[in-house]
Image (tube, grey):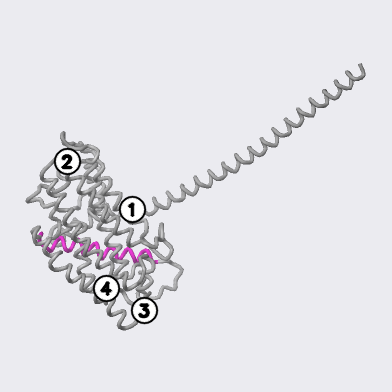
Amino acid sequence: MFYLGCFNIINFYSIHLLIYICISNYIKGWKFKSFKWIMINNNLILTFFNVLLSLIDVLVVLLPILLGVAFMTIIERKQLAAHQRRVGPNTVGYYGILQPFSDALKLILKETIIPSQSNKILFYLAPVSTLIFSLLGWGIIPFGQGLTLFDFSLGILYTLALSSLGVYGVLFAGWSANSKYAFLGSLRSTAAMISYELILSSAILIIILLTGSLNFTKIIEHQQAIWFIIPLLPVFIFYFIAILAETSRTPFDLQEAESELVAGFFTEHSSTVFVFFFLGEYSSIVLFSCISAILFLGGYHLPEIFVNNSIINIQSLILGIKTCIFCFIFVWFRATLPRLRYDQLIDLCWLNLLPIAIAFIILVPSILVAFDITPY
């Protein structure tokens, strides 16, 4: 009995000790897991707020740009009216200023008509991709010192890649519509864009050789003493011809030739999908105007003879004014110049502009080496 009693006591305490160990281990594990869960929640909250702040930054940049693109249409119509001694839109809102919103509402409320034999996925994807690629270019534009969504060290390479991808939207639009007019317009546009990208990239390559950088901010900083448009005026001339062709503007709008192709590559697009093409085209105009101001007019910098000692930062305003100058020139060319024939468009690129561009690619670095002023 004694041994049995000792065994029961030992067994009782052993069971309680075992239960105590199990409960303590469980509580420790629960505490560890709860602490770990709190840490995971904190990380998720921080990630969510970072994503939210990034989205707010993107919206702060894109919404004014989309408004600017909308008002670019009314500016073009009023400027064309002034060139042609007309009044232009003057009914919707004061001085016709609300006309873009009226046009957008009219187009959105129209019926979307899809050709029966078209490729419907590409038919919708083409205008959306055109708008997206034109808006993605704004992600690396410096609006002031430190005011950029992403200060990319390969910004120029990124811009050239996006301008190359923009061809696909036009090509898909013409092919997917199953229309001869749209297909011919898309082929014309593809050939013109690929041809004039050589001229555009050659002009930008000269600026890269002069600055030794692919970053937009560093290119702007190199123009504090003198804007590149002064020493590189011939380069600017064939650069501007190239961006006119890249954005399909007069006199290089052969893919939209009304007298030949009805409306070109977007002949079959209507309603909302046409709005995407419209926004994409004018967004590209404003974007290339801004890039031109950065590459040749010093971006957000004024010449050193003007010094801003006030607390007000006017750098973004300066860049906006320079961009408006190039937007004015875009419309001015449309009001002034007649449309070229397609063979003249291609001959101008391959027989005239390309040899000049190659000559300057050789000349500019030769001068830099001769005077020992290379930036690298």
Asked which secondary structure carries label 4, the reply is: loop
Q: Position of residue 256 (x, y in %)?
A: 14, 51
Mark 2 or 4: the one toward you = 2
Q: Quadrant of the C terminus?
A: bottom left
Amino acid type at mark 2? Ala
Res 177 label: 2
Residue that badge 1 annotates: 136
Res 305 label: 3
Report, in whole angstroms, how far the alpha carbon at label 1 lies from the one at label 2: 26 Å
Q: Which mark is first along the chain, 1 or 3?
A: 1
Q: Nearest the camera: 67 or 180?
A: 180
Q: Which mark is first along the chain, 2 or 1?
A: 1
Q: Nearest the camera: 209 or 97?
A: 209
Q: Which mark is first along the chain, 1 or 4?
A: 1
Q: Which residues are magenta?
A: 314-339
Amino acid type at mark 3? Ile
